Image (cartoon, rainbow, N blue to C red):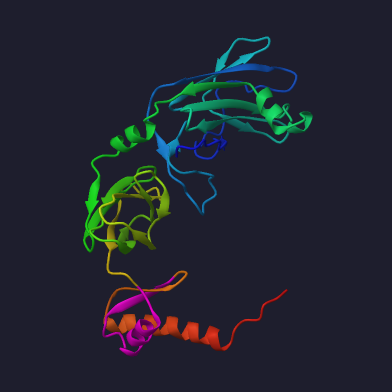
Amino acid sequence: MKKVLSVLLVLALAMGFGVCAFAAPEPGVKTVTGIEAVWNGEIAAIIDERGHHEIIYFLIPYFTPENVEITLHFEEDEPEKLTAWEVYNDDWSWYIYYSYDAEASAVTFYYQDSSIKQSSYESYEDYIAALPQTAITIPADFLQKYMDSLKPWTELQAGESKKAVLTKGKYEVFTFTPEADGLHYFYSENAVNAYPRAWLTDTAFTDIGGFNSIVELQAGKTYFLFVFTYTEEANGECDVIVSSDVRKLSGWQWVSELLSGGLFNRYWVRYSYYYSLPGKGSWTDNAKHNWAIAAGWIKAWLFPRPMYM
């Protein structure tokens, strides 16, 4: 997070505003000459939503018309305040977007419309410099203030289940400090009215994994697990669990657990390697699951798929 983030976010993605209360600038009618931004100081942030249509990134400040007031200035007209940040029509469009510089604790807002074409400039840098824009500063300790706003955090213990209350747009924060170095498995169970997702980080907010991740953690080091959902239900919930009983299967462990017929009550998962976890359900269910994985591996080994050039 300390390095410069210059991620440009087109904020049509999460606002849900279809129209704007004022007459949008149109070609030949209004020429935007300047832009003002007034931030109300509200702390907000967003977490990466990988796998969805929205382009959303890791813990960065999040701005919308709800916490930043944008005013456009025109060449031959009075300034007007925006109630939405984008309008798209077949022959004309305009929008507001912004970039975040973490090292400078600065956010720059830009105005772009159909009349400002990148092809008219020799370089992308010249194009960006030509856009009407303005910058604001935010606190250098923005992330700490945001984390404080999410308190109380819930402490996880290996092998224990903790309840997470899930509401779209809000994040439950769990902390976990391993007692020993080694592999750990984070997962959720018993989800109700929600599709739980998670983001696992260290205290520097480095992306480590999420639910159904097997990760190598260090003893005595604290980790954050951000739990969230995409559903609209206001009363969603799930159980959050971390297991320290994770084995990266060696060859002899693979054979012994397989031939035991599930008596070890272990449950296999495969990522880049085979891992063995505490059993889920009955020992017969686990045995069937593991034999199915083994059968797939044996089949792939005996009948490898041809490689196409």
Closest to the observer: 185 or 63?
185
Res 258 quadrant in image: bottom left
Q: The N terminus lies in which quarter of the figure?
A: top left
Residue 110 within the magenta-colored segment of the rendering: no
Residue 232 locus on image (x, y percent) = 39, 47
Closest to the observer: 259 or 196?
259
Q: The C terminus lies in which quarter of the figure?
A: bottom right
Residue 189 visible in image: no
Q: Left or right of 288: which side holds 159?
A: left
Residue 258 within the magenta-colored segment of the rendering: yes
Residue 217 visible in image: yes
What residue is at 64 percent from the left and 10 percent from the top? 77
What residue is at 64 percent from the left and 14 percent from the top? 74
What residue is at 49 percent from the left and 26 percent from the top? 106
**Is the residue 47 above or below the residue 125 in the image?**
below
**Is the residue 296 above or below the residue 173 in the image?**
below
Q: Left or right of 157: which side holds 68?
A: right
Count of marks placed on residues: 0
Q: Left or right of 282: which side holds 194?
A: right
Residue 271 locus on image (x, y percent) = 45, 69
Res 187 quadrant in image: bottom left
Closest to the observer: 290 or 85?
290
Residue 19 locus on image (x, y percent) = 57, 30
Q: Which residues are magenta?
A: 248-270
